[in-house]
Amino acid sequence: MILPSSESLTAEKVANYLPLSGHLPEIPGRIINVTHQIPYNILRTQDTASAIRKDDPAAAAPVSRLARHHYRSRTLRAKFHAADWTVVERRGHQALYAGLQSLNKNWETLHIGWTGPIRIKGSKKQVAPEQVALEDKKKLQELLWNKAHVVPIFLDKTSHGHYEGYCKEVLWPLFHYIVSSKATDGRAELNNWADYVAVNRQFADTIIAHYQPGDIVCIHDYHLLLVPQMLRTQLPEATIGIFIHATFPSSEIFRCLTTRSEILEGMLGATLAGFQTYSYARHFISSCTRVLGCESNQVGVNHNGHIVSVGAFPIGIDADRVHRFCKEPGVAPKINAIRDMYAGKKIVIGRDKLDETKGVLQKLLAFEKFLHDYPEWRNNVVLIQVATPTHGEHAKLEAKISETVSHINGTYGSLQFTPVHYFHQDIDRDEYYALLSVADVGLITCVRDGMNTTSFEFTICQHETHAPLILSEFAGTANSLSAAMLINPWDYAEVAKAIHDALTMLPEEKSTRHEQLYQHVISHTAEFWAHSFVKQLVDCSQQQSLRSHSTPALDLDKLVHAYTNAKKRLLFFDYDGTLTPIVSVPSDAKPAADMLEALRVLCRDPRNEVWVISGRDQATLDEWLGNAVPNLGLSAEHGCYIKSPGEANWTSIVNDVDMSWKQDVTMIFDYYTERTQGSFVEHKKSSITWHYRMADAEYGAFQAKECQSHLENAIVSRLPVEILVGKKNLEVRPMSINKGEIVKRILTRNAACELVICAGDDKTDEDMFRMLNVCHSGSSSQPNSPTTARWMQRDSSLFSITVGPPEKKTMANWHVRTSFEVVGFLTRLAAQDKPQ
């Protein structure tokens, strides 16, 4: 928010914009948090289920060789029971869920999400959704609502195509810059997309069922990208935020997605779109511009008049919870066990999911380079790498990693020493925090990662020993943790040198770097992130309300009533974007049959005078409308030419206007056309238009601003012309010739008019709305015009209608959202004139 220049920027005012230290926003309703899965695992009781014993050899931990403790007598994970159900807090995505749960401190919240796979307690067996009776579902719903205000969604078989199919096989790889090279017939992808849409629809329906006026909706991650627009359609005034926790690729990668337009349009239903870093936000804005042709700036996207704010909100972790985990009784014995196993050795720790994006293979190759370039560290340094199994086919990657580990150990190891200890398995929580605490160096080499909270947890675990952190510049946290040793994971020599520098770093530098990292981690927590996002979401919603005067939706019944009772009516319509949708190629915007039929009926009524006032040239209007609709009034080139109803010839308004400027403007437009691929110049009798709709969206907009500046300095400053900035075009025309002047001319000839209907969609149509408002209010700038004054003095009705969203800035007094609605009310009015 920008403060007025007259106000001073005080510390108190600055505090109002901070998420936790200033005033919290007032939310009239609740916060509805929506995630793909709820924060709990759902277990069904089974009499034969038996827990794994602590002394079970299969539960042995991979590093310290001390028994795991998944089944503790004491745990920090929430657990509650009812009937045959056991609900246990999930271990994964702790940063997300901790942030959302922190909102409970200040506001009333509820959480909507899928139950996830329902398992039999004590086994890995799953319960099929259709096997859960309705009565059992109700018991689980009551348990979750009473204990945690959670609304579970029970998905059917579509959950597989949604999650394992579309999310994990299409969106996740592409968002992480992995473009599939497998050629398929597309049927599986199409089925998975159908399941993705169906699950998003089920989520949207559940949200709508629980929504109350004043609620704000926060939707999380790439599993639910279509939900915002689905909600916007049903809840046009709702405050909706979407936050993407994964990376968001550059537009060149995103454009490879076959459903790119649907995904972007789904996200653009939100009030605010949040991302982990500014680069992800910038990629999203660029994709909207290049794929959908939206106007945009660094902080938002204009989609059909709806402004979607875009911002970066780096997530943190629950620092207090991690501190408690580090101090759990089971951690210290494992720290000692690891130190005993690797006595006298420096320990480099890596813990990642087994996924191409995590850079495990790159890490191993860099460690091999380290052992090669720095032989003094051989037999003195070990790399402990834990790769957690994940969903998907990673057999080739696992084989390659195992092969590389064997090669390194065979080359640089001996009977007494093994340089790389690789474990492909899940890891116990105590074991995890013991590894982070005992490390001499933390090594994270992801090649693409949305955030990577392991770097935060490593910092907290190292609060006493201050081991350096080597962090990939492609991790989302790299922007926040500048005190880490940032590396390019593809540059093995650079990573090798970073390992050497970390092992030889002086204690003073270690302490300085760690303190800077630690202060960031404990101050920018998950709670800070959640409050930042909610506060910005509320602020964006309020700013949109202030920016707009919320033009009401057209009251069709009121319009029909006024139309039926009026004895003399004037109807004005723009063409492109009003009577027909905007299209990429102007010549494709031919009139639809139902629109032409409605105009014919309206023009046959002697009480009506119907005009189409367009920027099109005379020949096009004659061909498309004049020859098809008898008795229709036409105005071409934004008011430069006029043909009254029933007349055969055009009348020029600009006969006496100097047109010598056209040659200079043509030279400037030709200059930019040569340098902007996809642009072209349209020559009209009284104006010249430069179109760039088919050019690259961002470059075209940039060139348009350069061209406009050039015209203003070279032409407008010395000649009587003006520039119209339209939708993907610039038009130069004579000054004081516009649609508003034509409307005024027509009004003076229709003093007995009792109803005026005027519809348009862009900036040129605002001239009509402005003139009509002046005439209707009686504040004409030409008070000596008696005919206009007589029309103003009558008890007349004015319906000025803009095409666009309610928040669009306009001089109109009603709105419809699309050109199809314009044709719809034309058809409704025409029905009043047809003989019954």
Image (cartoon, helix red, strand yellow):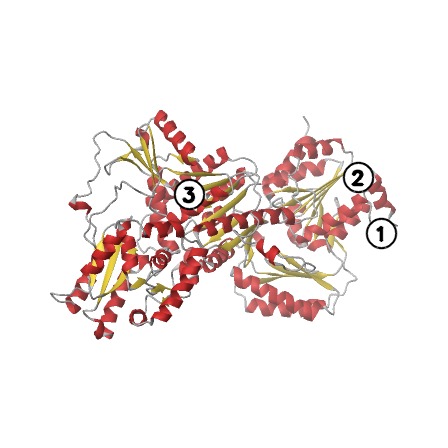
**What is the C-alpha distance between the residues marked 3 and 2?**
57 Å
Q: Is residue 724 above or below residue 377?
A: above
Across and down, in percent, residue 428 comes to 26, 49
Residue shown at 27%/59% (left/top)?
Answer: 438
Q: Are marks 1 and 3 in contact (CB under 8 Å)?
A: no
**What is the C-alpha distance between the residues marked 1 and 3?**
60 Å
Q: Quadrant of the C terminus?
A: top right
Left or right side of 549 for 241: left
Left or right side of 696 for 476: left
Q: Name the image quarter holding residue 711.
A: bottom right
Across and down, in percent, residue 281 comes to 48, 56
**What is the C-alpha distance between the residues marked 2 and 1?**
19 Å
Question: Residue 803 bears which disc, if any?
Answer: none
Q: Are marks 3 and 2 in contact (CB under 8 Å)?
A: no
**First-in-chain label (2 vs 1):** 2
Give whichever of 274, 586 is nearer the camera.
274
Q: Secondary structure under badge 1? A: loop
Q: Nearer the viewer, mark 1 or mark 3?
A: 3
Q: Amino acid at mark 2?
A: Cys
Residue shown at 30%/60% (left/top)?
Answer: 359
Answer yes or no: is residue 178 visible: no
Q: Secondary structure under badge 3? A: strand
Question: Residue 753 bears which disc, if any?
Answer: 2
Q: Secondary structure under badge 2? A: loop
Q: Which residue is mark 1?
A: 782
Q: Is residue 623 above or below residue 249?
A: above
Q: Which residue is mark 3?
A: 35
Q: Is residue 116 above or below residue 512?
A: above
Across and down, in percent, residue 402 comes to 19, 59
Q: Amino acid at mark 3?
A: Thr
Give whichever of 475, 415 is nearer the camera.
415
